[in-house]
C-alpha cells in the first residue's frame, strides 16, 4: 500500500520527528491522520519504532488506532485514526467544549 492512496486535506501539526496531516483515504473516503516521520542516516528513529510497536499491539477505545504503516521515499508514514482534538487541547486551560464522542471518552485523544 502506498501513501498515494491518501489525499492530504490539511496540515494538523509538526513535531520533532515529522509532520501530521489530516487526509482522506481515496479507497474508502474515510478521514485519517497521516504522521510522516523523517528518517535520518541511521534509519527510522527509535522513538518512532517504539510508538509503532506499542500502537500495533494496543487495542482500546482510549488509545488512537494505528491503521497502517507505509515506508516510502526514506520516510515512514503512520496512518492513524483521525481525532478532531488532541489531548493537549482537552487538558490545558482554557478548556474547550468537547463533542459528545470526546465527552464519553476524554482519554481517546492523540498527542502529537
Image: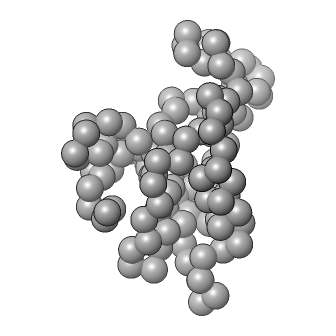
Q: Where 1 sits versus 90, above or below?
A: below
Residue, far left: 27
Q: Residue 19, how many percent across, how many down?
A: 52, 58
Comparing 52 with 87, the one in front is: 52
Residue, far bottom: 41
Q: In this view, does 47 lie to the left or right of 15?
A: right
Residue at image location 65% in from the left, 19% down from the top: 105
Quarter of the image with the N terminus is bottom left
Q: Where 13 sits versus 72, above or below?
A: above
Q: Is residue 77 left or right of residue 98?
A: left
Residue at image location 54% in from the left, 72% down from the top: 38
Residue 89 visible here: no
Q: Residue 107, how many percent across, how many down?
A: 71, 27
Residue at image location 77% in from the left, 23% down from the top: 93
Comparing 66 with 89, the one in front is: 66
What is the quadrant of residue 14 in the picture? Answer: bottom right
Amino acid at each position: 500500500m502506498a501513501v498515494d492512496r491518501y489525499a492530504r486535506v490539511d496540515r494538523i501539526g509538526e513535531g520533532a520527528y515529522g509532520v501530521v496531516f489530516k487526509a482522506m483515504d481515496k479507497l474508502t473516503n474515510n478521514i485519517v491522520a497521516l504522521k510522516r516521520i523523517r528518517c535520518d542516516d541511521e534509519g527510522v528513529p527509535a522513538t518512532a519504532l517504539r510508538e509503532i510497536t506499542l500502537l500495533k499491539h494496543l487495542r482500546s477505545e482510549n488509545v488512537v488506532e494505528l491503521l497502517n504503516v507505509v515506508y516510502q521515499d526514506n520516510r515512514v508514514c503512520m496512518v492513524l485514526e483521525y481525532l478532531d482534538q488532541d489531548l493537549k487541547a482537552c487538558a490545558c486551560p482554557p478548556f474547550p467544549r468537547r463533542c459528545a464522542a470526546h465527552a464519553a471518552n476524554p482519554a481517546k485523544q492523540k498527542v502529537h
